[in-house]
Image (cartoon, rainbow, N blue to C red):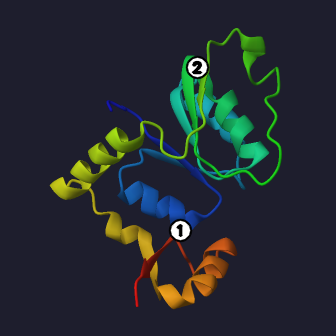
């Protein structure tokens, strides 16, 4: 989509290493730095054009929102387990002209079609993200593993029996 600098943020160094191998230009561990400050340094104080929040916490949502430049877009794809609030200061009192997309798959079928075309082209190997395989009968154990982020899990593939 024309991104010139890709900044990946995570609290897990292994995931950040994978992000780097998949094309991230900069990786930031939110457990060891102030992500918003670092992003502002990287962008010369302007902020980012687009941010994707995929963890589903109030803190990461706010950080993503605070990282946007005026007119920037936040795609919130995380699944939230409690009410989400939009702090007035992070939203620039509405003057930042920010756009917030809140769909798990913004663009629906068209976006998925484009994603599958990228995978089919071989330009990106998403197989490195799948660290564990489970049978459908063991899906509860797979969710437990992923939910508790054990054993270096990134993504789990569930296969029919």
Helix, strand or loop status at disc 1: helix
Q: Is residue 37 above or below residue 79?
A: above
Viewer-proximal residue among 123 and 39: 123
Percent position of residue 105, x then y: 48, 45
Residue 75 falls in image quadrant: top right
Query: Can you see residue 150?
Result: no
**Which class describes the residues within 10 Å of circle 2: few (<14), some (14-19), or many (20+)?**
many
Mark nearer the N terminus (1 vs 2): 1
Name the residue beneath numbered marker 2.
69
Q: Residues within 10 Å of mark 1 (few under 14, many from 20)?
A: few
Image spot of residue 144 (x, y percent): 67, 80
Indicate left or right for 64 with 134 as reference.
right
The circle on residue 14 is 1
Q: Is the C-beta separation of discs 1 and 2 under 8 Å? A: no
Image coordinates of residue 41 in percent, x first then y, are: 60, 29
Q: Position of residue 146 (x, y in %)?
A: 61, 74
**Residue for point 71% across, 54% down:** 32
Cα distance in 3D space between marks 1 and 2: 29 Å
Residue at coordinates 63% horizontally, 36% vertically from top-left? 38
Compared to residue 115, the image places residue 69 above or below, namely: above
Is residue 128 shown left or right of residue 76?
A: left
What residue sits 69% from the left and 28% below the top?
66
Where is the N terminus found, in terms of image quarters?
Answer: top left
Q: Is residue 141 visible?
A: yes
């Amino acid at each position: 989509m024309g991104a010139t600098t890709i900044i990946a943020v995570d609290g897990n160094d292994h995931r950040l290493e994978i992000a780097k191998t998949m094309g991230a230009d900069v990786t930031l561990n939110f457990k060891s730095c102030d992500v918003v400050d670092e992003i502002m340094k990287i962008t010369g104080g302007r902020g980012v054009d687009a941010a994707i929040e995929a963890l589903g916490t109030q803190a990461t949502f706010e950080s993503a929102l605070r990282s946007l430049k005026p007119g920037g877009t936040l795609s919130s794809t995380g699944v939230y387990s409690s009410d989400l609030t939009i702090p007035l200061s992070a939203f620039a009192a509405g003057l930042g002209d920010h756009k917030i997309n809140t769909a798990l798959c913004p663009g629906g079928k068209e976006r998925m079609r484009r994603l599958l075309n990228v995978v089919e082209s071989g330009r990106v190997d998403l197989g490195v993200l799948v660290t564990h395989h489970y049978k459908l009968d063991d899906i509860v154990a797979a969710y437990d593993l992923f939910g508790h982020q054990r054993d270096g899990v990134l993504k789990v593939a569930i296969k029919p029996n």
